[in-house]
Image (spheres, rainbow, N blue to C red):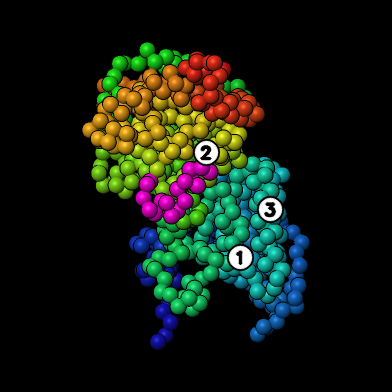
Amino acid sequence: MPERTEPADWTRCAGCGALVYRKRWTRTLHVCPDCGYHGRLTAPERLDQLLDPDSAESIGPVPALHDPLGFVDSRPYTERLERARADTGLAEAVLCAAGTVEGQPCVVAVMDFRFLGGSLGCAVGALITHAARTSLERRVPLVLVTASGGARMQEGALSLMQMAKTAQAMAELDDAGVLTVSIVTDPTYGGVAASFATLADVILAEPGARMGFAGPRVIEQTTGETLPEGFQTAEFLLAHGMVDDVVPRVGLRPVLGRLLGLRAVTGPLPPGDGAAILRAADELADRDPWQNVRLARHPERPTTLDYIRRLVDDFQELHGDRLAEDCPAIVAGTGRLAGTPVVLIGHHKGGPDLGERRRRNFGMAQPSGYRKAARLMRLAAKLGLPVVTLIDTPGANPGPEAETGGQAAAIAENLRLMARLPVPIVAVLIGEGGSGGALALAVADRVLVCANGTYSVISPEGCAAILWKDPRAAPAAAASLRLHPGDLLSLGIVDGIVPEPPAGAHQDHAAAADLLEAALTAALHELIPWAPGRLLADRRARFHRYGTDTGTDTGAAAADRSQP
């Protein structure tokens, strides 16, 4: 059958086969307007798409070995290189430049699959490493756009060494606190996927982009298994916790701009409103503890995502634990709270819709949720950003899947990580604070509770069933557990109480958000100027104090911690 040809002014989509007018194809950045298929861009086209106009500054070339093995297959490697250079107009399979994205400076390294399949050889490794060192010298983020079939066979074990070389360069950026972002395009396999592509702080992927260590054909031939639909695609990787987000090409620039603008606050901050946080139990309305429990669980209380939508500008949700899955019961990402860059992490119950509540597992996180939280906290520490956690959970997921996934260890790791995190941490119990599942996000410098929130070692029903041998005794158990905000303040468990609208947060989300913003701003503005040593010493003393008879009233100790 003769090969199909298209009219000169048209191109055929490789996804759906439709003909697309070339000028429209260019305007849509090589994305099919009918099926959304993302066609490949050349490295120069990608730089033009990502960087601000007239901001690109070429980086390179750098010296590298040329045909180190004298390799010959059906023709000499040198001839293949010459042909690739002639066909692409590039010196190698990666193009590097410094520039700006929405005004934010960065260094960008873009791979081009046309050049020997984007294979990782000595010259590519040298260029990626040079881009990383330029990023380090200028203290600006590094953006990597990957497209590769793997290591370059014609350079033998020397190509393999480029994986370690580039991984080392990424580690140097980690040590220096420089943000790294990877954009995975189709395809990204082998040595690139197993080195710098997956070592970035944030991994974004274009729709449909495939990434893996071994290609699907190799996997099927080796194992004899039939792979599932969509295996190794961006959407598959997102569901399995391997990438932070899938972003259509048209949305990459704004997402990158938000991420590249993250940097620690420097200089003095105006004092927060001291009256935004209640410091005495008698400032609260007198309420029966069981009624308090019911209000904390009210399905129409504002959720973490409700508060994020109202309080956080430029929020970029980041997904996945980079191991196995993305837990929907934990929401995490970056943004700006009253102008201050923060990492925000919270339990999310799902709101009043029962289907969404079930999908979110009623805010009961899997081990992957706590590992996702830990990953974001480590990013906060690297970039010097404060952490805000919003807690609303009956407890960690108690199911067999969570147990086999290492639930206890995941919670324990978070407790240890938060104890040593060198940035300010503010935790707020916005609803239900249940057991270790809540504590896993609450080892903080300032722990606040909303006026109708709770915090307890066990649910009142569970306590009643175990100790009273009667679940109907839950109201009595609620009183005995002293989980009411006033009791928590008197015990020194929390540092203050966030007021709520008179009828409760579920009656007025906007007013509840305003009150929470004022309390968070007051706490953050107090803590941000503190040096890491002071934060860690104060946090250590705080938790060491619990359960120890120091001769000091715990409520007074909590009040002392609230002072600058």
Q: Residue furthest left?
A: 472
- Disc 1 designates what residue? 191
Residue 540 lies, in percent from the top left, at 58, 29
Residue 426 lies, in percent from the top left, at 49, 29
Three-letter residue code for mark 3: Ala
Residue in the picture at 38% in, 53% down:
400
- Disc 3 designates what residue? 169
- Disc 2 designates what residue? 415
Judge whether residue 89 can be spotted in this image: no
- Magenta span: chief secondary structure: helix
What secondary structure is found at the residue carrying circle 1?
helix
Q: Is residue 533 above or below residue 150?
A: above
Q: Quadrant of residue 541?
A: top right
Judge whether residue 269 can be spotted in this image: yes
Q: Answer left or right for 196 relative to 252.
A: right
What range is drawn magenta here? 397-414
Q: Is residue 404 magenta?
A: yes
